[in-house]
Image (cartoon, rainbow, N blue to C red):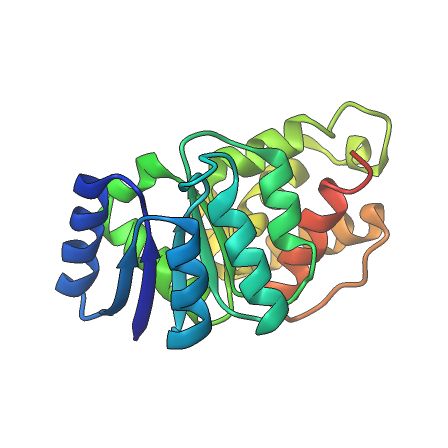
Amino acid sequence: MRVVLAEDLFLLRDGLVRLLEAYDFEIAAAVESGPELDRALAELVPDVAVVDVRLPPTHTDEGLQCALRARRARPGLPVLVLSQHVERLYARELLADGAGGVGYLLKDRVFDAEQFVDAVRRVAAGGTAMDPQVIRQLLAGRAGDGRPLGRLTPRELEVLELMAQGRSNAAIAGHLVVTERAIAKHTSNIFAKLGLEVSDDDNRRVLAVLAYLDQGR
């Protein structure tokens, strides 16, 4: 699996290269700036891009903007974004096209090798990998604002958070130590209250829920 990596800090970039190579990823390019990332994504056509939000020359959202441009040129290009802090706007922009193959992780997660590698593989396969802290902040920003999310029970909010992380009903059931049938019921209730169609496509349902949670900010 070919990866384009963008990170301006040399030590972190070098560490990520070594980590991914240890798990049999091929590093097609490891770059440190926005212009380099634009060229690498256009010319190398990677299986997945792992991108720091803030890159030179602007050190604002250069990395994210490069990723968004690449996804417009190649819809569905898998992109895993790394960020130091939770930025709700970045999560919304990344999910806006609904094409799948997206992830948003805080850099703290990089230090858990298996969790990070699992996220890269999940995104490369067209799935979604959202940091639990990002989901909590999206939920916290909407749970009490009088919108349909406010009608969810505490257990339904918990299930929604786990669902939004990309977990299947079976995985959620195992995490909460309940039956899969109970989770299916909670899921149906969640979609009914949010006015969303129930779908067997895990990635599509996650994207739909996240897009709903962050719409109309």
Residue 99's spot in the image, x, y percent?
64, 67
> Looking at the image, which is closer to me, 87 or 8?
8
What residue is rendered at 46% in x and 61% in y? 38
Residue 72 quadrant: bottom right
Residue positioned 61% across, 35% down in the render:
88
Q: Left or right: where does residue 23 sit relative to residue 48?
A: left
Whether residue 212 is situated above or below residue 106 in the rendered picture: below
- Would residue 136 be found to the left or right of residue 40 on screen? right
Residue 118 visible in the current orientation: yes
Question: Looking at the image, which is closer to me, 100 or 154?
Answer: 100
Give the quarter of the figure containing the N terminus. bottom left
Measuring 21% from the left and 60% from the top, which residue is drawn there? 20
Q: Position of residue 48 (x, y in %)?
A: 40, 67
In this picture, is 113 found above or below 125? above
Res 130 visible: no
The quadrant the C terminus occupies is: top right
Compared to residue 38, the image places residue 86 above or below, namely above
- Residue 115 versus residue 22 in the image, above or below: above
Residue 85 picture location, percent across and down:
46, 29
